[in-house]
Image (cartoon, rainbow, N blue to C red):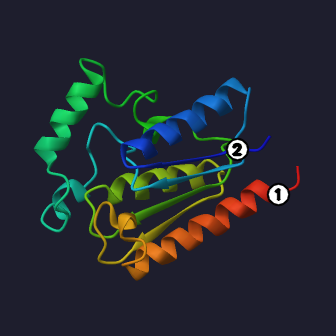
Amino acid sequence: TKIALTGDSAGGNLALLLLSRLQQEGTTTPVGAVALSPVTDLALTGDTWSSRAEADPYFTRSQATDLVTAYVGSLDPKIPALSPLYGDLRSLPPIRVHVGNDEVLLDDTRRYVERAVESGVDASADVWESMTHGFLSGVGKLAAANEALEAIGAFLVDRLTVSE
């Protein structure tokens, strides 16, 4: 049975964490993963939290800080079990990430994909110009959302039909 993981925003965080966990355990290895605007760094250290703050109406730093605190409590948000950016990315299957250029989470994608590539993973990011968080909910209305959905579908079909 072949599986691929997908997730959006906080779900992108969970999908990437699960991908790493499954790889480490060696029990089930997904054939790939797609993350949409994933939160990869719960420490919120990316520069785009400031540089894209005005452009992205969906998150404020204070709102995100409150959400992270409610989720992690007193734990260090940089532990790999919470923030995929800080995990061991070696030997992961192919990963595709989609993010808007106007998102506060843009650096979460950039830095995660850079680390994955440096670790030898077939990983890439599609950065969609002038798009904010949640732009994929505009499927049927936004050209970028339609194109992203087609790219995601093509990647998943390819990964799910690959010969082992």
Give the residue at the far bottom of this rendering: 143
Q: Residue under circle 2?
A: 3
Mark 1 vs mark 2, CA separation in Å? 11 Å
Comes first in the chain, label 1 or label 2: 2
Dot 2, crowdedness within 10 Å: few (<14), some or many (≥20)?
Answer: some
In this rendering, would 20 be left or right of 42?
right
Give the residue at the far right of this rendering: 164
Residue 79 position (above or below residue 121): above
Residue flagged by tag 1: what amino acid is it? Val
Asked whether disc 1 touches disc 2, contact meaning CB atoms under 8 Å apart, the reply is no
Question: What residue is drawn where x is 31% and y is 24%?
Answer: 76
Disc tally is 2
Question: What residue is drawn where x is 24% and y is 17%?
Answer: 74
Query: x, y (%) of residue 27?
Result: 74, 26
Residue flagged by tag 2: what amino acid is it? Ile
Frontmost residue, 149 versus 69: 149
Query: x, y (%) of residue 8?
Result: 42, 51
Dot 1, crowdedness within 10 Å: few (<14), some or many (≥20)?
Answer: few
Frontmost residue, 76 versus 37: 37
Q: Quadrant of residue 94?
A: bottom right
Can the viewer see residue 88?
no
**Secondary structure state at the residue bearing disc 2:** loop
Can the viewer see residue 113?
yes
Query: x, y (%) of residue 34?
Result: 55, 54
Frontmost residue, 156 versus 112: 156
Q: Residue under circle 1?
A: 162
